[in-house]
Amino acid sequence: MSEKRANWGSNLGLILAMAGNAVGLGNFWRFPYQAASNGGGAFMIPYFAALILLGVPLMLVEWNLGRYGGKRGHGTLGPMVYLQAKEGVSPKTAAILGGLCGALALSVTVLVNSYYNHIIGWTLGYSFLSLTGAYMDPSIDTGAFFANYVQSPSLVLTFWIISLALLGYAVMRGIEKGIEAWAKFMMPMIYIFGFILIIRTLTLGAPVNPDWTPIKALDFVWSPHWEALSWKAALAAAGQIFFTLSIGMGIICNYASYLKPDDDIVLSGLATVSLNELAEVVLGGTIAIPLAYTFLGVDGLKSGVGLSFIALPNIFRSISGGGVFGCFWFLLLFFAGFTSAIAMYNYIVALLEEDMGINRKKGSFYIFLLYIIVGLPICLECFITKTADLAYFTELDNWVGSYLLVVLGLIEVIVAGWIVGKKNLTEMNKGGYWKVPNWFFTFFIQFLTPISIIILLIGSTSEYIKAGYFKIVPAFVASTPTLVPWVQAARFVILTVLVIGFIEAYKKIKSCYGKELESNVSEKGL
């Protein structure tokens, strides 16, 4: 199969869009509390190990998979995996692998974005509330303020729908005029806001306690703390690498499908990783953690997901110009989340374009409606239960946003390293200024990376069993019966989307490569 596909307008636009895909809420919202709650420097040791063992190899695998599929007219993961897998296994087996990967990718792009878009809406809402001083009164409890926010239909629905409408408009405009154009604006703004906030953070001094300074906070993050190393920190670090680089989601492959046949994927892939790490480690780690440490000490770093929406607003109202700096912080989160969400949005629009013949404008509108439907349970739970427990959100994130993407990454690297093997190295190096050396492909992509992912999956499964996530009624809602139906609804939705995803991907493969599947003999492509 071969058809005319859109391309990126420039290498700069490509790299910024890819970096925007990777640079998301995981860098500024998730990374600070993951690093802080897992021992600071004790987290950073396995974090950088996971970056080398998992992040860089999988990034190259996904760029290669996407460009290869794009040359044959595919922008979604099922057919891409099929095309490569049939080089080493029978077409029928390859079609099953493709269907499974298509199902996992659809579950991520539909369900992760169903709650991710809500968080983006929260950040936009909090940007507005920071400027208007809504939480600046010291008598206001910022925890209660956040709980009231997520239970307020007028606030939640307004900013959520605005965010979704902007996403839909950007994707509707296409690759160059939409996604690339927004990335060229938003990515520089992320770094500008980030460096402004870093300067303000590092000049805070010690307003609360002489021992609580921004420099001490950086020491907490960057001192190795070998004695505090733990299996829990290692698992959290590896999971963070998957989430922050957007690997195991299918969206990097989708963006890479719009490359020209000989575009350099090695240099571009490494540039994407570098820009992401600059945003995460330098910006994310030098804003939220020092801010919280300076005013709240080590205990303030244990705020978890509330670090951005509860702890930091409490701090912004304590500093001169806090409303403006609060607005900068939440706009930074909004831009970061937007550039990642747009990639997930585009993945499903590409599926409608290629598999159902629906044009991009109509497809963007249909996906806007889809995200309204799949996102409603997130806010309805808060409105109906009158709590901010977010059980439905939590269950989706536990499985789709933290577990299934690791499974998808494992399948991808096994297909690339073992089923296709060294032929993939030749494909990966086409048009490359830098070449992936033979030893790297053998040592990492064929051995260390799949072994590391298997260890991660075993460890994560063990932790999930201990946490009671495999129970019919998970431990985290066992004492709150009103939340159990929301967890069960999340599980039903996950299973439904996986089944639909498998059927859709398998049917697409069969419609394009039916003769191969009938004969069960592949036509070699690499």
Image: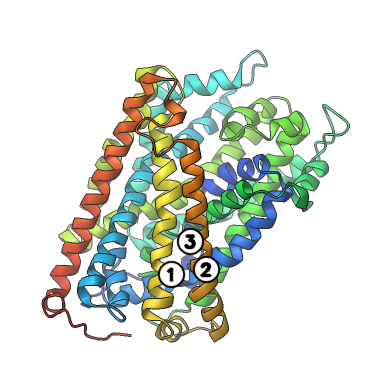
Q: Position of residue 75 (x, y in %)?
A: 30, 66
Q: Quadrant of residue 164?
A: top left
For the residue marked with disc 1, what is the amino acid?
A: Val
Q: Which residue is mark 3?
A: 454
Give the amino acid at mark 2.
Thr
- The picture places residue 141, in percent across and down from the top left corner, at 61, 17
Residue at 43 percent across and 50 percent down: it is 403
Amino acid type at circle 3 is Ile
Cα distance between the residues tagged 3 and 2: 9 Å
Res 449 label = 2
Where is mark 1, residue-wise?
413
Mark 2 neighbour class, 10 Å CA radius: few under 14, some 14 to 19, many 20 or more: many
Q: Position of residue 25 (x, y in %)?
A: 52, 45
- Work out whether mark 1 precedes mark 3 in sequence or the reverse, and give the earlier one: 1
Question: x, y percentage for residue 496?
Answer: 24, 44
Give the Cα separation between the discs numbered 1 and 3.
Answer: 11 Å
